[in-house]
Each structure stands twice: as C-alpha cells, then as structure tokens.
Image (cartoon, rainbow, N blue to C red):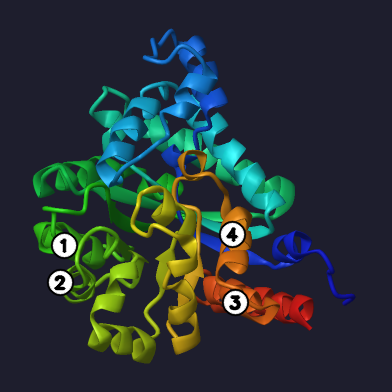
C-alpha cells in the first residue's frame, strides 16, 4: 500500500477500536439544544456558545456536574438513537472499525426514563451503523460508583430481562463516575455476580484515584481491562505486572489534560507506558466535552510526545488486541494495520 504522507490522514487510515467512550459524553452542545427544544427541557444556558464556555473543568467532579445536566435532555428512544448515531458517524470518519461503548442507565432511570428506552435507542443505532458501514459495536453497561452497590444490583436486575434481545451486543459491565472515595471493593459483590453471568468486566481506576485502586480493580473486581490507569506509574511493581500480564489500559489523553490529571500533554506518561511494553490504548472518553474524538487524541499525542508512525500503528494494534472481538476479527484488523504501517 502506498504510504500516507499527511499525519492526520495516516492516523485516520489506521484501523482501530475505541474502547473507552461514554455515549452520554458524546452529546455535542448543538445536539443538546436540539433535544432540549424537541423535549421542552429548559437549559441553564442561553446559547450553544454559552454552554461551550462552561467546559472549563478544574477536576473530574466539575465535569460530572455538567455531564449529568447535559444528559437531562435525553428522554425518548429516538434521542438515544440520535446521540449514538452521531458518535458512530464521527468514529467511522476517524477510522474506528469497532467501538465498545459505555452507557450509564442510572443517569436516566433516576430521572424516570425506562431502562428499555435507553437500551433500545442505543442498540438500534449500533445495528443500523453496522448494516450501513460494517462498523461493529459492543455495549458496556456501567454502574455509577458514587451510588450504592445496592443501586447497581437493582440496575443489573432491571437490565437482565433485556439480555435475550441485546445479548449479541451487550457483552460487558463497567464502573465509572466519581473515583475518589468510591474504591473498587465497594462493588465487589455486584461484579462477582456479573462475572458469574458471563459478562466481560472493565473498571475505571487510577485516573484521580491512587495506583492501588488499579490493583484492587484487578484483584477484587477481576476487571480484564483498566479504564484510564495512568496513576499506575506511581507503583513500579504494578507497571511490571501490567506488562507481564498484558492487562490493557484504555488511556484518554485529551480527557486527562482537560480534567487536570496532567497539566501538559507533553508530560503525559502514555509514551513511557508504550515504550515499556504496557498494552496501552488511545481513546476519547467524553469527546464532546474534552475537545476531540479518537483521531484528535492520536494526533495530539503524536505531536506532544513525538510518537513515530510505527508507534501510532502499535497503539492502533494494541486497541485491537485489547478489544473483546473474536480472535478471527482481531487477526483481520491487525493485518490491515500492518499493511498501512509498511
């Protein structure tokens, strides 16, 4: 294959998966206002620009406050469809061949939205996009860690009757929201139940929380993949374990910058992880709020960390390895990465 000269085009040409994206975090201000008007929801912002100007976060919680307010416009099955389809179209344009999408039913059921509405809107968009373009998606239903484990069990029990209808795409369980003060062991029982049910398990850890939250997510929750995990660097023995066991980290560089996890992208530890042999991947997290979708994240770190094209290809390859795709599909996608990188 002829080499792609332009770096942006090269990044988009690389087949990749996105493993850490919150679908509610893909709600662009324009769509928030459109849905608010559709559903007669009053917003505390006078315009799209005023809402964008509110995206000046000092930490994770300041973002979450705005994130939950934005989600209030999601009422109908069509709203969830429109949000998901908008994300999938952007991901497809970025060269994403497969996405593993986190969604938070509790954000909506607490507002009186039926869990069936949430599932059906997201799933319909996923299936429509696959039929149109071949972009596949899996769903990772995530529990909000600032709520109780009992609330997580209630959500799980409400969702399980839907497994027959959506089991082909609903493959996993995640844990997100406020990390500080909500350690992994708080959800040990519900994660054990999900493991018994055969779900794949992921968990946020080591973003604002300490490195031992990563260790606990692995040992207590039996997470197969760690979302974020950048604080793992504080524990060299843990980093060595990540390398030896090839435990994936789904890192979100622009999110880390926007939420002040790092104060300069040039100081991000992603390149160090990559060069040490950690199975690190690049993802967008909540792209509508953090200033970029997955290709924007690749481009930003390529420039800030002076990554070579081979290293960018390795990151794309890592994303495929770290996915929950079948072995055959992984092999086919990895072969395409090698063809682009030659």
Task: State if disc 2 and disc 1 touch (CB < 8 Å).
Answer: yes
* Disc number placed over residue 184 in the picture, else none: 1
Q: Residue at x 29, y 88 (%)?
A: 241
Q: Which residue is mark 2?
A: 220
Q: Which residue is mark 3?
A: 317
Q: Mark 2 or mark 3: which comes first in sequence?
A: 2
* Disc number placed over residue 171 in the picture, else none: none
Task: State if disc 3 and disc 2 touch (CB < 8 Å).
Answer: no
Figure check: 42 above or below 306:
above
Q: Mark 3 or mark 1: which comes first in sequence?
A: 1
Compared across the picture, whether 39 is left or right of 151 comes to right
**Residue 342 appears anywhere in the view:** yes
* Disc number placed over residue 300 in the picture, else none: 4
Category of crowding for the residue at label 1, using alpha-carbon neighbours closer than 10 angstroms: few (below 14), some (14–19), many (at least 20): many
Q: Mark 1 or mark 4: which comes first in sequence?
A: 1
Q: Nearer the viewer, residue 7 or 159?
A: 7
Given the current orientation, which residue lies at the most extreme right position?
A: 2
Q: CA distance from mark 1 to mark 2?
A: 7 Å
Q: Mark 4 or mark 3: which comes first in sequence?
A: 4
Q: Residue at x 51, y 12 (%)?
A: 38
Q: Position of residue 297 (x, y in %)?
A: 56, 58
Figure check: 120 above or below 165:
above
Q: Which of the 4 image quadrants contains residue 298?
A: bottom right
């Amino acid at each position: 294959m002829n080499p792609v000269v332009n770096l942006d085009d090269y990044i988009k040409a690389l087949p990749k998966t996105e493993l850490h994206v919150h679908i509610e975090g893909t709600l662009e201000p324009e769509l928030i206002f459109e849905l608010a008007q559709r559903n007669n929801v009053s917003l505390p912002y006078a315009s799209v620009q005023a809402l964008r100007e509110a995206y000046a976060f000092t930490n994770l919680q300041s973002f979450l406050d705005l994130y939950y307010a934005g989600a209030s416009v999601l009422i109908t099955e069509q709203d969830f469809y429109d949000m998901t389809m908008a994300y999938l179209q952007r991901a497809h344009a970025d060269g994403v061949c497969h996405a593993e999408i986190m969604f938070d039913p509790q954000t909506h059921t607490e507002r009186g939205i039926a869990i069936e509405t949430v599932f059906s809107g997201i799933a319909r968009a996923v299936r429509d996009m696959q039929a149109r373009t071949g972009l596949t998606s899996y769903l990772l239903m995530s529990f909000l860690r600032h709520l109780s484990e009992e609330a997580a069990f209630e959500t799980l029990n409400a969702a399980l009757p839907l497994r027959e209808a959506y089991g082909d795409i609903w493959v996993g369980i995640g844990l997100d929201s406020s990390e500080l003060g909500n350690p992994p062991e708080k959800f040990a029982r519900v994660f054990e139940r999900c493991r018994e049910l055969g779900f794949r398990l992921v968990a946020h850890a080591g973003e604002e929380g300490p490195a031992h939250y990563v260790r606990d997510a692995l040992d207590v929750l039996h997470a197969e993949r760690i979302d974020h995990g950048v604080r793992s660097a504080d524990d060299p023995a843990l980093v060595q374990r990540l390398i030896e066991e090839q435990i994936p980290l789904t890192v979100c560089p622009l999110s880390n910058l926007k939420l002040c996890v790092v104060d300069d992208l040039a100081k991000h530890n992603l390149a160090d992880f990559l060069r040490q042999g950690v199975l690190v991947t690049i993802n967008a997290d909540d792209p509508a709020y953090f200033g970029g979708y997955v290709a924007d994240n690749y481009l930003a770190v390529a420039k800030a960390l002076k990554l070579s094209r081979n290293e960018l290809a390795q990151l794309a390859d890592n994303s495929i390895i770290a996915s929950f795709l079948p072995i055959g599909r992984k092999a086919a996608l990895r072969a395409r990465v090698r063809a682009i990188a030659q």
